[in-house]
């Protein structure tokens, strides 16, 4: 188990798929995450999205649970696009449960993932991409020690316009 001071990234269980489906089908949560334009996903798609990634080792996906209630997934997080040659990976976190925002869970889970990446997997650089308007996320990542490295101008289509994406590492 990977213990943070507030949250625990743990293995995704089949009982988490319904919660993860709710989170991923929520526009308010998915749009600020950046990435490909949102589309609705079924429970089956959610299951088939997470399982093969873990198997082939190109990603490590976790459900995030509060430390005092390990059964309940409040979000998900992980490392993806792992490169064995460059020893790099990208990091992503999101909390679907709004009551968890702004309580330090974000920086805590980033800290746990970075430690897992560096100490357990001997990676050397972790990058994340964040929507430039996502102030809460940027502040959380800065609190976890990430710094802005580059800006992708008009990098993504987001809710009716092109938006900048910020790379932090
Ligand atoms: C972004 C997210 C992962 C951050 O996790 P978190 O636990 O909420 O973040 P933290 O508590 O570690 O830090 C939040 C910071 O934003 C600040 N903040 C809180 N609400 C804010 C708001 N509405 N606007 C701007 N900043 C805000 C907090 O004060 C804190 O900054 P500080 O330490 O400088 O005071 C989480 O809010 C989330 O999942 N949001 C929805 C989806 C999303 O945006 N995912 C990220 C994709 S890159």
Image (cartoon, rainbow, N blue to C red):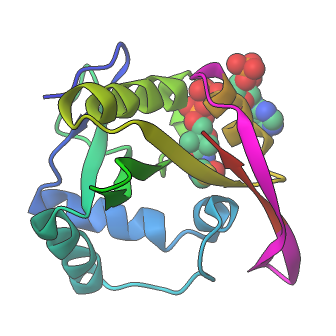
x and y percentages locating residue 154 in the rendered image: 86, 73
Q: Residue at x 67, y 40 (%)?
A: 137
Question: Would you identify the image quadrant in which residue 120 lies?
Answer: top left
Q: Is residue 169 left or right of residue 132?
A: left
Between 120 and 74, the one lying in front of the other is: 120
Rendered view: 10 above or below 145? below
Q: Tell me if residue 155 is in the magenta stretch.
A: yes
Q: In the picture, which quadrant includes the C terminus?
A: top right
Q: Residue at x 35, y 34 (%)?
A: 113
Q: Residue at x 15, y 47 (%)?
A: 11
The number of numbered badges drawn on the structure is 0
Between 150 and 42, the one lying in front of the other is: 150
Q: Residue at x 27, y 21 (%)?
A: 67
Q: In the picture, which quadrant includes the N terminus?
A: top left
Q: Tell me if residue 98 is in the magenta stretch.
A: no
Q: Is residue 8 visible?
A: no
Between 37 and 81, the one lying in front of the other is: 81
| Ligand 1 visible in quadrant | top right
Question: Would you identify the image quadrant in which residue 43 lies?
Answer: bottom left
Q: Is residue 30 left or right of residue 32?
A: left
Which secondary structure dominates the residues rendered in magenta?
A: strand
Q: Residue furthest front?
A: 85
Rendered view: 89 above or below 21? above
Magenta residue span: 143-163
Q: Is residue 128 visible?
A: yes
């Amino acid at each position: 188990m990977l213990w943070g001071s507030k949250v625990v990234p743990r293995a995704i269980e089949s009982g988490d798929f319904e919660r993860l489906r709710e989170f991923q089908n929520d526009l308010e949560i998915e749009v600020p995450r950046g990435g490909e334009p949102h589309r609705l996903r079924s429970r089956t798609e959610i299951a088939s999205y997470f399982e093969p990634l873990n198997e082939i080792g190109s990603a490590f996906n976790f459900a995030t649970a509060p430390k005092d209630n390990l059964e309940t997934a409040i979000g998900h997080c992980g490392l993806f696009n792992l490169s064995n040659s460059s020893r790099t990976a990208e990091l992503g976190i999101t909390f679907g449960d709004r009551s968890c925002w702004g309580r330090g869970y974000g920086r805590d889970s980033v800290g746990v993932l970075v430690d897992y990446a560096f100490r357990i997997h001997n990676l050397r650089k972790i990058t994340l991409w964040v929507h430039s308007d996502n102030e809460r996320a940027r502040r959380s990542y800065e609190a976890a020690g990430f710094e802005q490295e580059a800006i992708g101008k008009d990098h993504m289509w987001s809710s009716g316009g092109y938006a900048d994406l910020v790379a932090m590492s």
